[in-house]
């Protein structure tokens, strides 16, 4: 962790520098085909501004979570397993961010995926956890397959391209950069159909990992894992990998304009879509989970609009306040043993630090200045707005993302008011709440500080210049002018309105009961059921995949197995008959000898002469 | 000798062979099996002697010589067979070959 | 000639009948009796074919030694010599096989070269010359094989007596 922070800090102090150490582990000689100059596969580490940024996030959040887990998980019998999986998870993520080529990236990507599977299914004896783990693994797998296909297409298409060394990209191990040149995006950004498909594939991979629409279903269910794992997955590791992939791809490989529009659309839509689902949910962790999906939508939106570094900046700040929210929620759960918001209440009195931490996280998430979320989120919105002139097609998604600001503020403070305000818990059977022990408090304090001050880093010139990395490729963040200030003010006002609404409806122990009109109730049901996506996927799974599987099973069972068993039965029958020949009676064997002898006679004396006469000799 | 005898001798040896064969295939007692084999062998010896009698020179002599050898063989074979009978009797307590079914899978 | 043919017919019929009887009677000692008659009968046929040496050999080896050996086998394996053998069916398949073999062999008669019609009488000394001079090495080989077989038989009988 210390090492990671040091690298990250060093990178920040000397912006734009590159450190690349690589080792070729497989080299294929030049041969005719798609790789006429040969093909190298390398394993290397690359530290450049984006990986430095990510390293900071991963190591700091990882450290906080590890520290927090000491107390949070101490009662659990699977502690060694937990820590080894957590360490592997963090190591994989760190490896991912410093990979210098897509193949290595993919290896770590898969490692991250499998670790998330382990950790979500940490309570594997709980059926819901086991199935959530499977769901996460399978849904992200859909993305992984697309990602791999995307890698192949890029490898194939760009095999000879690039300013790197001699012989093209393939011969040099597909590394992202060499020297100070961002590689492909600037020199050979193409717009062929093949590249569009490759971009969609990469987007698919990122969407699976980062839980973007329509592959978002696994993330809320991933709440089955320990809260600490949720914090890690949501802040620093799993979902960050998808965004990081998109950023890397947009900086180094480049997307076609269609891909970019698609990315913007998915990002903007997801930001709003996920926020609506968070509005009604009673589970404290799931509310935060939806907010993650929503915030990831912002990042994707930023990357799609061409501001990869801003997306990563939002990832950076988001990591801190999201980890903070989760750790605070974990502290609540640790104290009272339930995740149901409607059972909580009045916790502010007994858990002052937790309440404060959650509030800080909430303010940062809602985008209230000067908390971290404000700077990054408004940067994104302003940047996208500045781009609207040249890309009018982005308008609806910009508006959706803008509207999501209001929802975000509303739902996160709904959760806060429900949990912390009021006089006493709504469910009197809950145990007496108590503040978390120090081991859990320290990480929350660290993260609170970062959630407050993380955004202010942009006023530090070195850090700000980091965000300018990839200029000309990633787009230039707008300079703040009057338009941007108006924009920010509106968004702050929206967020404030959201908080106010939450206060009016839920504050001080109030419980807002939705009007019993059919429309309102059906909307609520729709949101609670997450737009029936899971049902739909289950339906697809059951009816589509299961039918195919049934057909395959039928084919396997009756055609292949049938053939095999048919052979088997035929021969079993035959051998059963034949077995009787082996009676063990000497006389029977003698009979066969005699019968064979007679057969020879018949052949030799009767049939052979006939054949000879018929064919005139052999 | 006329053709009747010609037919008769061959027919006799054929019949004896068939009877021996039949005995080999049906009898369960090992001694009866041996006897059946002897009958079949005698059929062969008879054939040799018969054809030797109606041949001449070395060929005929050789035929009779083979007959002599086969008779010797038969004696040996009975001796060996008897050895098997005794061994079988000791191992199985019977000389019924239907009980000796170790060849069965 | 007629006399000889009649004698042959009688001897042949006796041979067939005794052979069948030997296989079908259920008293094992009776079987030995029948087979002894069968051997003697065949020896007579050899005499009829003017092969007295072989006839004597048949009498000595078969009617004498082999019969005694078989009887000995029965005596050593039975508690009571006169005990009946369990009936065994004739069995259509072996019977059919035997019949088919018979038909085949008889059908082959036409294939044989016609004999001279006169019976050649061989001098036993010529026979011995043929046996020991011309075919001597082969006889030696056969003798060795038979020796091995007899040794094996002795071993079989001996085994387990320790």
Image: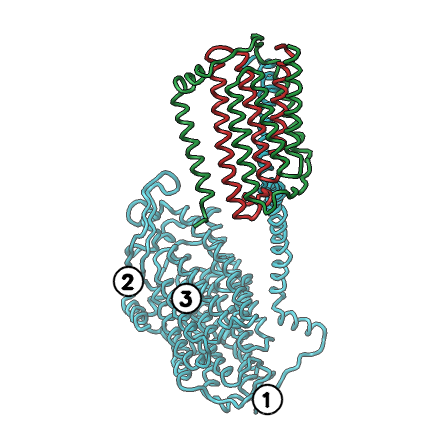
Chain colours: A cyan, B red, C green
CA–CA distance in space, label 2 to label 3: 18 Å
Can you identify the residue that label 2 sits on? A17
Can you identify the residue that label 3 sits on? A312
CA–CA distance in space, label 1 to label 3: 44 Å
Please name which of the two marks, 1 or 2, marks the residue nearer to the observer: 1
Residue B75, percent across and down? 50, 31
Chain of the residue on which disc 1 is drawn: A
Residue A98, percent across and down? 34, 62
Q: Is residue A379 visible?
A: yes
> Position of A267 compared to A579: left or right?
left
Element assignment for label 3: helix
Where does the N terminus of chain A fall, quadrant-wise?
A: bottom left
Q: How many marks?
A: 3
Chain of the residue on which disc 2 is drawn: A
CA–CA distance in space, label 1 to label 2: 58 Å
Can you identify the residue that label 1 sits on? A429
Residue A594 or A291: which is nearer the viewer? A594
Residue B32, percent across and down? 60, 36
Element assignment for label 1: loop
Compared to A359, does A294 lie above or below? above
Chain of the residue on which disc 3 is drawn: A
Residue A365, percent across and down? 48, 75
């Amino acid at each position: 962790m210390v090492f990671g922070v040091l690298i990250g800090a060093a990178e920040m102090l000397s912006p734009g520098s590159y450190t690349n150490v690589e080792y070729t582990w497989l080299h294929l000689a030049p041969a005719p085909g798609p790789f006429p100059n040969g093909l190298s596969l390398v394993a290397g580490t690359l530290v450049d501004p984006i990986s430095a940024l990510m390293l900071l996030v991963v190591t700091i959040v990882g450290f906080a979570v590890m520290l927090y887990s000491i107390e949070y998980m101490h009662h659990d019998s699977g502690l060694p397993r937990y820590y080894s999986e957590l360490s592997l998870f963090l190591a994989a993520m760190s490896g991912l961010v410093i990979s210098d080529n897509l193949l290595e990236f993919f290896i770590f990507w898969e490692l991250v995926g499998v670790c998330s599977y382990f950790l979500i299914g940490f309570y594997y004896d709980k059926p819901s956890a086991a199935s959530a783990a499977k769901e996460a693994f399978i849904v992200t797998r859909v993305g992984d397959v697309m990602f791999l296909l995307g890698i192949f297409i890029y490898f194939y298409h760009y095999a000879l391209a690039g300013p790197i060394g001699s012989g093209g990209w393939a011969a040099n191990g597909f590394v992202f950069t060499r020297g100070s040149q961002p590689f492909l995006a600037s020199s050979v950004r193409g717009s062929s159909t093949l590249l569009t498909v490759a971009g969609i594939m990469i987007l698919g991979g990122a969407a699976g990992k980062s839980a973007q629409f329509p592959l978002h279903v696994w993330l809320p269910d991933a709440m089955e894992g320990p809260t600490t794992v949720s914090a890690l997955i949501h802040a620093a590791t799993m979902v960050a990998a998808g965004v990081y992939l998109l950023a890397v791809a947009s900086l180094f490989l480049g997307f076609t304009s269609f891909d970019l529009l698609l990315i913007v659309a998915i990002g903007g839509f997801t930001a709003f879509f996920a926020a609506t689902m968070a509005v009604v949910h009673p589970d404290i962790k799931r509310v935060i989970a939806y907010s993650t999906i929503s915030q990831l939508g912002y990042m994707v939106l930023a990357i799609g609009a061409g501001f990869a570094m801003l997306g990563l900046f939002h990832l950076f700040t988001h990591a801190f306040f999201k980890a903070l929210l989760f750790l605070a929620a974990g502290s609540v759960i640790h104290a009272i043993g339930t995740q149901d918001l409607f059972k909580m209440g009045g916790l502010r009195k007994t858990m002052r630090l937790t309440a404060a931490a959650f509030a800080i996280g909430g303010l940062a998430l809602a985008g209230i200045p000067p908390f971290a979320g404000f700077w990054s989120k408004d940067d994104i919105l302003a940047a996208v707005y500045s781009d609207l002139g040249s890309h009018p097609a982005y308008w609806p998604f910009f508006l959706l993302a803008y509207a999501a600001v209001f929802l975000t503020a509303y739902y996160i403070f709904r959760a806060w008011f429900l949990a912390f305000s009021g006089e006493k818990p709504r469910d009197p059977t809950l145990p007496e709440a108590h503040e978390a022990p120090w081991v859990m408090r320290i990480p929350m304090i660290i993260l609170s500080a970062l959630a407050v001050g993380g955004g202010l880093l942009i006023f530090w010139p070195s850090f700000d210049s980091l965000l300018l990395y990839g200029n000309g490729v990633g787009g230039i963040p707008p300079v703040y002018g009057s338009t941007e200030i108006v924009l920010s003010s509106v968004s702050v006002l929206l967020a404030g309105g959201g908080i106010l609404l939450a206060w009016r409806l839920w504050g001080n122990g109030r419980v807002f009961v939705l009007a019993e009109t059919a429309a309102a109730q059906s909307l609520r049901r729709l949101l609670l059921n997450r737009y029936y996506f899971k049902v739909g996927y289950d339906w697809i799974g059951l009816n589509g995949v299961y039918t195919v599987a049934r057909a395959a099973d039928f084919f396997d069972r009756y055609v292949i197995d049938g053939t095999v068993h048919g052979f088997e039965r035929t021969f079993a029958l035959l051998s059963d008959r034949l077995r009787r020949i082996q009676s063990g009676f000497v006389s029977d064997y003698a009979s066969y000898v005699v019968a064979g002898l007679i057969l020879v006679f018949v052949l030799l004396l009767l049939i052979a002469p006939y054949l000879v006469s018929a064919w005139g000799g052999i | 000798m006329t053709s009747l005898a010609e037919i008769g001798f061959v027919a006799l040896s054929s019949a004896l062979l068939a009877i021996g064969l039949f005995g080999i295939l049906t009898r369960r007692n090992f001694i009866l099996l041996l006897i059946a084999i002897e009958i079949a062998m005698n059929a062969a010896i008879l054939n040799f002697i018969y054809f030797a009698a109606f041949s001449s020179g070395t060929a005929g002599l050789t035929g009779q010589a083979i007959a002599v050898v086969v008779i010797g063989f038969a004696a040996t074979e009975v001796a060996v067979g008897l050895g098997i009978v005794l061994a079988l009797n000791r191992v199985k307590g019977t000389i019924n070959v239907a009980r000796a079914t170790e060849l069965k899978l | 000639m007629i006399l000889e043919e009649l004698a042959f017919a009688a001897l042949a019929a006796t041979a067939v009948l005794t052979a069948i009887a030997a296989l079908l009677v259920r008293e094992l000692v009776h079987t030995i009796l029948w087979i002894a008659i069968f051997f003697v009968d065949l020896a007579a046929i050899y005499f009829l074919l003017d092969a007295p040496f072989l006839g004597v050999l048949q009498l000595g080896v078969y009617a004498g030694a082999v019969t005694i050996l078989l009887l000995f086998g029965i005596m050593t394996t039975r508690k009571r010599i006169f005990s009946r053998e369990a009936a065994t069916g004739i069995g259509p398949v072996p019977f059919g096989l035997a019949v088919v073999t018979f038909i085949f062999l008889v059908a082959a008669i036409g294939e044989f070269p016609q004999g001279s019609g006169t019976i050649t009488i061989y001098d036993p000394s010529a026979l011995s010359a043929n046996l020991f001079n011309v075919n001597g090495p082969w006889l030696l080989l056969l003798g060795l094989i038979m020796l091995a077989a007899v040794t094996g038989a002795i071993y079989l009988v001996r085994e387990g007596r320790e």
